[in-house]
Amino acid sequence: MTGMAAHHLWWLAAVLLLAMEVVFSGYFLLWIAVGAAATGLLSACWPSLGWAGQVAGFVVLAFAACGFYARWRARRHGPRSAMLLNRRGEQMLGRDGVLAEAIVQGRGRMRIGDSLWPVQGPDLPAGTRVRVTAVQGIMPQVVPATGTASPDVS
């Protein structure tokens, strides 16, 4: 490996980071690999840049790539999606569904997507379209749906 140009080493590091991304798949190493590849391009265009400058450039470019991804992901998925991870009941707030079983004495079952959920609400017959207005523990609270419906996406 003696005599190998610095930009080749950065590109090799990018390929190794991409290989690690394939194995561990979390999208994080991908963006560090982008930083390494960009550093390789930087060192190819500016060969007199020393190792300290290349490492500083890598740090800046890797952070910039990770920051770009974080901003893009937040814009695409919104901040609410991360907060509701593993909180299925709260993810249903505002969604409409159909009662699969009548609500009798305040309890029934509603279908959202391909799942049946136990629900609480006023007594209503099966087949009534209802909207989730609150969640108590894991139990959605429903009322009859009126007006524009929140789509039942599943």
Image (tube, grey):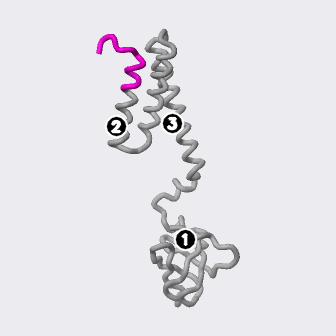
Residue 63 horizontal/vertical position (percent): 51, 31
- Say which label, 3 or 1, has the lower sequence index: 3
Mark 2 vs mark 3, CA separation in Å = 16 Å
Say which of marks 3 and 1 sits in front. 3
Q: Is residue 50 above or below residue 104?
A: above
* Three-letter code, disc 1: Val
**What residue appears at the point 34 percent right and 36 percent down from the top-left corner?**
19
x and y, in percent, of residue 112 in the image: 51, 74
Q: Is residue 84 above or below residue 55?
A: below
Residue 140 locus on image (x, y percent): 53, 74
**Residue count near mark 1 (Cα–Cα under 10 Å), binned few <14, some 14–19, many ≥20:** some
Pick whichever of labels 1 and 2 is earlier in the sequence.
2
Residue on which disc 2 sits: 20
Badge 3 amino acid = Cys
> Which residue is identified by label 1?
135
**Magenta-colored span:** 1-12
Residue 9 included in the magenta stretch of the image:
yes
Q: Which residue is mark 3?
A: 66
Q: Is residue 145 magenta?
A: no
Q: Nearer the viewer, mark 1 or mark 2?
A: 2
Where the N terminus falls, by quadrant? top left
Circles 2 and 3: CB distance less than 8 Å? no
Q: Residue at x 49, y 70 (%)?
A: 137
CA distance for labels 3 and 1:
35 Å
Whichever of labels 2 and 3 marks the residue nearer the N terminus, that label is 2
Q: Residues within 10 Å of mark 2 (few under 14, many from 20)?
A: some
Amino acid type of the residue tagged 2 in the rendering: Met
Query: What number of labels is visible?
Result: 3
Is 64 in front, or is 82?
Answer: 64
- In terms of secondary structure, where does tag 2 sit? helix
Instruction: Give the farthest residue toward the right.
Output: 147
